[in-house]
Amino acid sequence: MKPKIKQLFPELEQIKDEELRAKVASTWLEAIEKGEWGITELEKVPFTLLIPDCKVNLVDHTRAVTQTALRVAGALLEFYKEKIKIDLDLLIAGAILHDVGKILEYAKQRGKAVKSRTGKLLRHPFSGSALAYKHGLPEEVVHMIATHAREGDGGYRSVEAMIVHYADFINFESLGGKM
């Protein structure tokens, strides 16, 4: 099933570290299995339940956030050169995994995604961070997942975590989402 994860998220191939790339894919695979979703269903899962009748799926949102994050990082690196360090492998991993916990936060009910029992207890930054930690992802990636949403407000965010956070909110709010 890992080749299917790579088809869903072609940005995985931009991660140079093979071990990191494999851990990102295995984290998504476990989320899909634990959430009892089929891999083909991911393209039908809305990226948010906060926008009524959301027409953007989780896969497209994840890819858009990843691409947005890469473009922001590119601009920062171009203009600030030696003044800033951004680990692109970690950034891509964090962006691809930022919403992986939504697969556990949501459940299928009469053909629609609804809040799951797990989702009522733990929002996706918590469940996603736990999955990433379990799969041995670097703490920097776990940090990005944990702090990308409002749960990270008021605390420390690394440069990569800030980029993923703002990339996510640019995409969310552009589509009509409000917090």
Image (tube, helix red, strand yellow):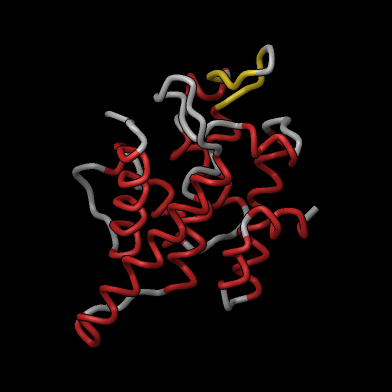
Q: Is residue 123 left or right of residue 25?
A: left
At x 31% / y 59%, what residue is drawn?
Answer: 163
At x 80% / y 52%, what residue is drawn?
Answer: 1
Residue 175 placed where, x, y %? Answer: 36, 36
Q: Quadrant of the C terminus?
A: top left
Residue 111 placed where, x, y %? Answer: 68, 17
The residue furthest right is 1
At x 37% / y 47%, what residue is drawn?
Answer: 168
Residue 117 placed where, x, y %? Answer: 57, 18
Of 88 and 176, the residue lying toward us: 176
Q: With respect to residue 59, does 9 lie above or below?
A: below
Of 70 and 85, the residue lying toward us: 70
Q: With respect to residue 160, does 165 lie above or below?
A: above
The residue furthest bottom is 82
Q: Is residue 15 left or right of residue 172?
A: right
| Residue 45 figure quarter | top right
Q: With respect to residue 107, does 12 lie above or below?
A: below
Residue 63 placed where, x, y %? Answer: 52, 53
Disc count in the image? 0
At x 51% / y 31%, what residue is drawn?
Answer: 55
